[in-house]
Image: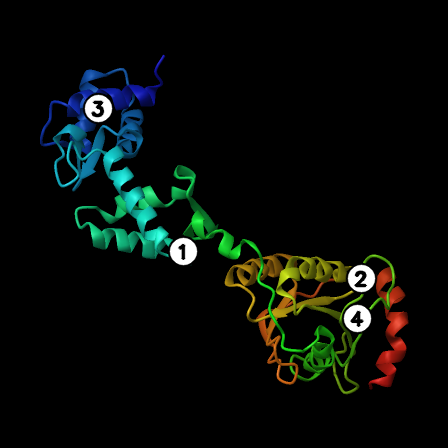
Amino acid sequence: MATLKEQVIRTAISILKRKPKGLRNKDLCQQIAKKKPELNPNTIQGGVWNIHNESREVDKVEGLFKHAKYQSGNLGRADSKATRGERIVQEAIRLLEGSPDGLRYTVLCQKIAEGDSALKIHTIRGAIHDIQTKRAEIEKVERGLFRHIKYQDDKSTPEIISINGSKEEDFYPSFAEWLVGEVEDATHAVALGGNVFGGRWGTPDVIGKKEPHPFDVVKGGTEIVSAEIKSDTSQLITAFGQACAYKLFSHKCYLVVPKNSSEADKKRLDSLCQLFGIGLVLFNADNADNPNYQIRARPQKHEPDLFYTNENVKKVEKLWSQNK
């Protein structure tokens, strides 16, 4: 048995088949009410307002609902939605085949509209917004970015960046200085790395401590800040996991990655860091003398587990004392 909405749509289609000039929403609802007096007016209105998206047999042109058989134009027959939609999809595929980096949603819609002035922009948007679910050869790389799968292999393997002789450890001291002098998230900071903390939970590459200044009127408590620095762009996911682990004993955590990481990786890390309250910093991985640290996302302060904080801080307290 047809639902009330299906009854409205079927009745509307049968009426529009006999109306070459089409009908406006109000007139169509009135005619449906005459044929189906048992239907509630609100039910009729709810079934009609979006009927052009519910049925391929109905189009909405300049405020008028028309049966597809009365639509004509450069798409032939019947300018049906199925034909228009497929034409839009085919043009999108053609454009994406010539775009190795993919095209953003807005740009793709604009290019299709420029190529066929007979197509309405809202029709193009409706056909494109989920194109990756309609055609297997199209993928959605990230929010709003479509790419043909033939270019998938170009970026499926993370690029390993040459750092021209600079070792990852070469950046530890300069980042420690940056934490103290530039962002003032620490009053003392030292390069650590290695396996100082032992165990499987890792050791930060840089760890700092922020203590209240003797002349501060309102004195806060001691804060621990930790950082994971990664110069190898194939290890960014691992680095993020390590930075998350440092939240166990740190009030603030930083993830420091190369500026020349892929845009897709940087955007994902940006979102993840904001979700987990981790600071994201970009740096020049090919120049240890001028790393040029830049904040992409600031860290959020949280309360760590003080048992682990004290356990780990004891192991580096002497290093802080030496660097005062």
- Closest to the camera, between mark 1 and mark 2, is 1
- The structure residue drawn at horizontal position 77% and vertical position 71%, both measured from the top left corner, is 223
Q: Distance between the residues labelled 4 and 1?
A: 39 Å
Residue 319 sits in quarter: bottom right
Q: What element carries label 3?
A: helix
Q: Is mark 1 on a helix, strand or loop?
A: loop
Instruction: Say above or below: 59 vs 311.
Output: above
Task: Name which of mark 3 and mark 1 comes first in the sequence.
Answer: 3
Q: What element carries label 4?
A: loop
Is the residue under label 2 in contact with that under label 3 (CB below 8 Å)? Answer: no
Is the residue under label 4 in contact with that under label 2 (CB below 8 Å)? Answer: no
**On the image, numbered disc 1 is attached to which residue?**
102
**On the image, numbered disc 4 is attached to which residue?**
193
- Closest to the camera, between mark 3 and mark 1, is 1
**On the image, numbered disc 3 is attached to which residue?**
12
Q: Distance between the residues labelled 3 and 4?
A: 71 Å
Task: Give the quadrant of the N terminus.
Answer: top left
